[in-house]
Image (cartoon, rainbow, N blue to C red):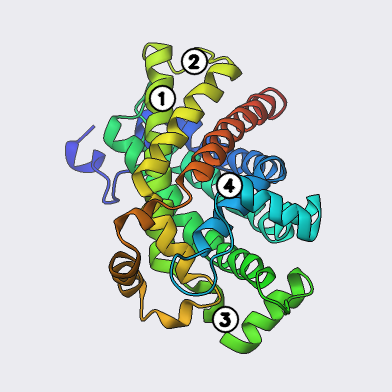
């Protein structure tokens, strides 16, 4: 064949070249499987881990300065919450996270699987840099499409309970009130911090998870990884992400609270926390967050892997 005729005038798509027709047909299926498995995983996981998320948020909102100091630690927060609102007071705001966790997890895993399919080599492996990029892309996608509005409403719900006369009567009433008083932008407070947090979160988590899996498999992507091992790897990945971006999480929480208007922007919030409360304030709530995230990520990856294995068997 003449070389001039053989050269096509279209941009190349390496992921199709590496994986052949199966990539074109199967890449979409992998993304859909990731979305479905991720959505189911998100719903189950949040029902298990929400109480620790509630305590973490309460402690972060309990600023040192001002008259809002209410709790002296994790145990005191739990005790006072149960005494004032009953055991299910620890689940206040669950509906907000439940409505948000399903699409958040679906977007995260669906995006990661799609990026992974487009980036992996002919053997199905990712380089370290590609693991970071795929995780970062998944985190940014979930931050914009799901996490920012969900987290903003969640924090406002929990903060609202701390007031003498709560305004929100339920999820939809709360969302309606927030939009009525602050506009649609009211559900996107702290979007910059959230993008940074979720992007770094998922970049760290997926990098650690994929690296540990690759080490366990010895470079063979077809080798099965036991679910308990996946859970252990997930706990390590979760711990790494906590120590990597807790300061961003603290700033994000303040920016999404009911008093967010007192800050000019994300940078102003960070500067004022440093000036008024000191550097240790950026790691406030680390212990409850660490326990929640390690459990959360371990459970999430175990459940997700289980559903992906199931879908692989029934959905060819």
Judge left or right: residue 103 versus residue 201: right
Depth order, front residue of 160/113: 160
**Discs 3/2, front:** 3
Label 1 crowding class (10 Å Cα cut-off): few <14, some 14-19, many 20+? Answer: some
Q: Are marks 1 and 2 in contact (CB under 8 Å)?
A: yes
Q: Are marks 4 and 3 in contact (CB under 8 Å)?
A: no
Which residue is the site of mark 3? 184
Q: In whole angstroms, how far apart are the C-alphas of marks 3 and 2?
A: 46 Å
Task: From the top left corner, tell me how far across and down residue 175 is, in percent.
Answer: 68, 75
Among the two numbered marks 3 and 2 on one chain, the one whose residue lies closer to the N terminus: 3
Instruction: Say which element carries label 3.
Output: helix
Whether residue 18 is situated above or below residue 85 in the rendered picture: above
**Among the 4 quarters of the image, the one containing residue 263:** bottom left
**Discs 3/1, front:** 3
Q: In whole angstroms, how far apart are the C-alphas of marks 3 and 1?
A: 42 Å
For the image shown, how many numbered marks are present on the structure? 4
Can you tell which mark lies on residue 222? Answer: 2
Can you tell which mark lies on residue 124? Answer: 1
**Discs 4/3, front:** 4
Among the two numbered marks 3 and 1 on one chain, the one whose residue lies closer to the N terminus: 1
Q: In whole angstroms, how far apart are the C-alphas of marks 4 and 3?
A: 34 Å
Can you tell which mark lies on residue 151? Answer: none
Among the two numbered marks 4 and 3 on one chain, the one whose residue lies closer to the N terminus: 4
């Amino acid at each position: 064949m003449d070389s001039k005729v053989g050269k096509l005038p279209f941009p190349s798509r390496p992921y199709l070249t590496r994986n052949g027709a199966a990539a074109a047909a199967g890449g979409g299926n992998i993304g859909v499987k990731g979305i479905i498995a991720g959505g189911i995983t998100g719903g189950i996981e949040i029902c298990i881990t929400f109480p620790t998320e509630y305590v973490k948020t309460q402690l972060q909102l309990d600023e040192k300065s001002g008259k809002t100091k209410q709790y002296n630690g994790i145990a005191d927060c739990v005790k006072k919450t149960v005494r004032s609102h009953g055991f299910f007071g620890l689940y206040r705001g669950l509906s907000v996270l439940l409505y948000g966790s399903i699409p958040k997890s679906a977007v995260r895993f669906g995006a990661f699987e799609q990026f992974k399919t487009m980036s992996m080599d002919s053997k199905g492996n990712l380089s370290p840099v590609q693991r970071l990029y795929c995780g970062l892309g998944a985190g940014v996608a979930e931050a914009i499409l799901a996490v920012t509005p969900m987290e903003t409403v969640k924090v406002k719900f929990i903060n609202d309970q701390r007031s003498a006369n709560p305004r929100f009567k339920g999820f939809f009433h709360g969302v309606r009130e927030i939009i009525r008083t602050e506009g649609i932008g009211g559900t996107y407070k702290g979007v910059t911090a959230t993008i940074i947090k979720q992007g770094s979160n998922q970049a760290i988590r997926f990098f650690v998870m994929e690296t540990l899996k690759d080490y366990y498999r010895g470079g063979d992507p077809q080798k099965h990884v036991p679910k308990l091992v996946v859970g252990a790897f997930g706990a390590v990945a979760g711990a790494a992400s906590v120590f990597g971006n807790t300061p961003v999480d603290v700033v994000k929480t303040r920016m999404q609270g009911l008093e967010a208007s007192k800050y000019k922007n994300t940078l102003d919030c960070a500067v004022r926390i440093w000036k008024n409360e000191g550097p240790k304030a950026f790691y406030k709530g680390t212990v409850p967050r660490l326990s929640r995230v390690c459990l959360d990520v371990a459970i999430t990856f175990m459940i997700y892997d289980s559903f992906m294995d199931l879908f692989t068997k029934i959905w060819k």
